[in-house]
């Protein structure tokens, strides 16, 4: 199953809405660090597997794995397992607003990696909006940055993990596109998330000594249970399928990825209303600069070819 080109941008936008609430539900789970990544992707992978197996056109998950396992397995372990391990772990060090804003650098990395891998040129508008986004991120980092360095530096580690996560997710999105075109976005997303979930489960168990038992979900507090379920099914099963599938379907992947710049506005709103985070004026300005660039890029009219008179 592939998302039609005409619905690509809408799919990406809905996917961004799902991404925007992931930090919020991750905090509500009450589960810290790498463990929440395992829960999220085990539940999300289960949802994708059931969804794929229910459809006749996506039921065959063996063929893509048999034909492209050399690319798919390492791509999933790096672009899913490692990327989202860093994402959730960063929330233990940096604030929700910091992580949400830094992860929005994904479109910048998409453009750069797309240029390096596929030789897709970056337009002047993309360069300008990318510079604006980087400026916004820089403003965010300078907010209390010196205080962090003179203290314990924990926030700095969270910042670095969030940026590295953005680069890995962007790389996965670009490299996985040919696989999605060939085998369908739903099958590749299902396999990637499933392989990534297994990688997370083994990695967190081996290096942190936390072996997540999915059967213990019912033993958690009520808020943690429904937060993990939402984080798994909505923020992973549905969101990842629409986000990755929409990017693969879009003619201009970099342009479509700029919708991701809307993420911090929604995430910051959730953090302020429900988590009690208090953004500074500099953080709000950074969010405005970073998020505003999406409107310039997405709504900037593309240049039409000039017809020469005969």
Image (spheres, rainbow, N blue to C red):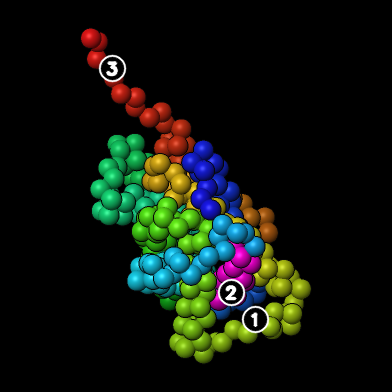
Q: Nearer the viewer, mark 3 or mark 1?
A: 3
Q: Is residue 178 visible?
A: yes
Magenta stretch: residue 51 in it? yes
Q: Can you say whether 281 is above or below 129 in the image?
A: below
Residue 274: within the magenta?
no
> How far, Cα to Cα, is label 2 from label 3?
54 Å
Q: State left or right for residue 147 relative to residue 88.
A: left
Q: Which residue is mark 3?
A: 307
- For the point 57% across and 64% down, which residue is it? 59
Q: Which residue in the rendered view is the most extreme toward the right?
A: 222
Q: Percent position (x, y) of residue 272?
A: 63, 56
Span colored in magenta: 38-53
Locate residue 233: give its quadrant: bottom right
Q: Which residue is mark 2?
A: 42
Residue neighbourhood size for the residue with mark 2, other residues' Cα within 10 Å, grouped as few (<14), some (14–19), many (≥20)? many
N-terminal-most mark, 2 or 1? 2
Mark 3 residue element: loop
Which percent across, then down, holds residue 24?
A: 62, 62
The tag on residue 46 is none
For the residue pair 80 and 27, the one nearer the viewer reads as: 80
Q: Is residue 178 above or below residue 78?
A: above
Q: Secondary structure at mark 1?
A: helix
């Amino acid at each position: 199953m592939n998302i039609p080109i005409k619905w690509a941008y809408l799919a990406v936008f809905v996917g961004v809405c799902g991404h925007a609430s992931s930090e919020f539900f991750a905090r509500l789970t009450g589960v810290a660090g790498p463990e929440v990544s395992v829960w999220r992707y085990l539940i999300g992978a289960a949802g994708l597997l059931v969804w794929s197996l229910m459809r006749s056109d996506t039921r065959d998950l063996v063929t893509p794995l048999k034909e492209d396992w050399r690319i798919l397995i390492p791509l999933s372990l790096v672009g899913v397992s490692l990327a989202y391990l860093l994402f959730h772990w960063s929330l233990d060090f940096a604030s929700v607003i910091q992580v949400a804003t830094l992860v929005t650098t994904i479109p910048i990395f998409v453009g750069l990696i797309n240029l390096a891998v596929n030789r897709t040129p970056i337009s002047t508008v993309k360069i300008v909006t990318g510079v604006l986004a980087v400026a916004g991120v820089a403003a965010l980092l300078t907010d209390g940055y010196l205080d962090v360095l003179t203290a314990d530096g924990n926030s700095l580690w969270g910042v670095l993990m969030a940026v590295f996560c953005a680069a890995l997710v962007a790389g996965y999105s670009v490299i996985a596109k040919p696989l999605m075109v060939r085998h369908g976005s739903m099958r590749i997303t299902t396999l990637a998330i499933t392989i990534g979930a297994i990688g997370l489960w083994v990695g967190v168990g081996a290096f942190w000594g936390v072996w997540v038992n999915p059967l213990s979900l019912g033993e958690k507090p009520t808020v943690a249970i429904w937060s993990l379920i939402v984080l798994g099914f909505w923020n992973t099963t549905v969101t990842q399928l629409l986000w990755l599938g929409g990017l693969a379907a879009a003619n201009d992947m970099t342009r479509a990825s700029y919708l991701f710049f809307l993420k911090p506005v929604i995430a910051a709103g959730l953090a302020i209303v429900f988590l009690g985070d208090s953004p500074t004026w500099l953080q709000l300005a950074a969010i405005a600069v970073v998020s505003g660039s999406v409107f310039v890029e997405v709504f900037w009219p593309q240049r039409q070819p000039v017809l020469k008179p005969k």
